[in-house]
Amino acid sequence: MGSEPRTGSPGPRSRRRLVLLVAVGLVLIAGAAAYRYLLLSLPVGEGPAGPAVSREPFARPWTSRKVLLLGLGDSVTAGYGARKGYSYFDLLVANPPDEFADMRGLNLKAVMPGLSARNLAASGSTSPEHLDAIRKHLEVQPADVLGVVVMTSGGNDIIHNYGQTPPREGAMYGATLEQAKPWIANFERRLTEMLDLLATRFPGGCEVFLADIYDPTDGVGDASAAGLPRWPDATAVLGAYNQAIRRCSQSRSNVHLVSMHDAFLGHGIHCRELWRKNYRSEDPHYWYYANLEDPNERGYDAIRRLFLIEMAKVLPSAAGGRLTSGQP
């Protein structure tokens, strides 16, 4: 039989497909608008960010020894999103020309004149790569060198690959807590091995300042509000990772926890919402970069302050003993 000639008007199936394409397009447009609103239009604020740092510990030198400030970890320590000189690692070493008045002169070079700095952190890296960096790129230091190590590790293990691939170790976004438990246990063992290796690389002694992992959702756990796939167990997995970091810091006298997690609550995607438990009325601003996972420059200022506060508790008192004498 011959077929009916085509009239040019779409049939029911074609119309449904067209409607579906239009709907998908509208969803994508709405998602892009939401992303722009949430991440690119959030109030950043201006001026200093984070806690005040006491000047008293910086009034006199902490040690005359040679000191190596070593950066390890991911993009937070690498300084992704900050101008040169404005990452927390750079700010620890020296003040920039336009330093805030309350922070002028508060840096490690001012109290450790024998300081040198080396940053092995890499943007996008995960904890297995951090272990490899120590193994492959950190040689044994001379016995007269004190190590001061700053470290951020584990955040990329959790957030990669943003739900675009099935969850796995090192890229567990979307995993249930039960699924993630073996990976979390491996992370804790890996972190322990890193700390063991650091001890061998610094025979003259080292003090490790280890940061926990912040939460850009301000404890709400709704990364979907920022355009990422829904992840019901996100806060549980993050909490378990941070517990592992805290156990490692508590088990060693030379490892000191720097709590970025607590300090950054209220400065994420819900920073404007005054009804939230973690709302910060004194500074209701966004401390993250446009990619959601790294700090902006105000966030780096806050992190620098958190590290300096913890260092000022530890290093000046040690300077009266083995730091000055050069003995491990």
Image (cartoon, rainbow, N blue to C red):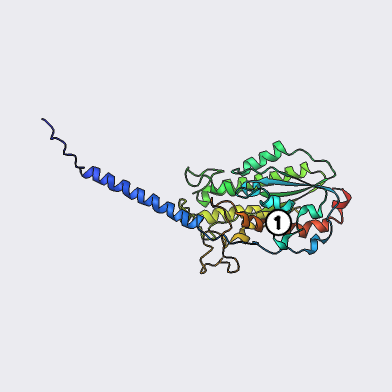
Q: Which residue is drawn at 79% across and 64% down?
A: 56
Residue 50 versus residue 195 in the image, above or below: below
Could one spot residue 248 in this view of the protein?
no
Horizontal and vertical percent for residue 23? 33, 50
168 to the left or right of 328: left
Quadrant in which the N terminus is drawn: top left
Label tally: 1
**Residue lying farthest to the front in this orientation:** 97
Q: Which residue is drawn at 50% across and 47% down?
A: 162
Q: Residue at x 74, y 59 (%)?
A: 104
Horizontal and vertical percent for residue 50? 65, 62
Could one spot residue 288 in this view of the protein?
yes
User: Crowding near pointer 1: few (<14 within 10 Å), some, many (20+)?
Assistant: many
Please tell me whether mark 1 sits on a helix, a strand or a loop. Answer: helix
Horizontal and vertical percent for residue 49? 64, 61
Horizontal and vertical percent for residue 181? 56, 49
**Residue lying farthest to the top in this orientation:** 1
Please state which of residues 122 and 289 is positioned toward the viewer in this rendering: 289
**Residue lying farthest to the right in this orientation:** 325
- Residue tagged by mark 1? 307
Q: What residue type is labelled 1?
A: Phe
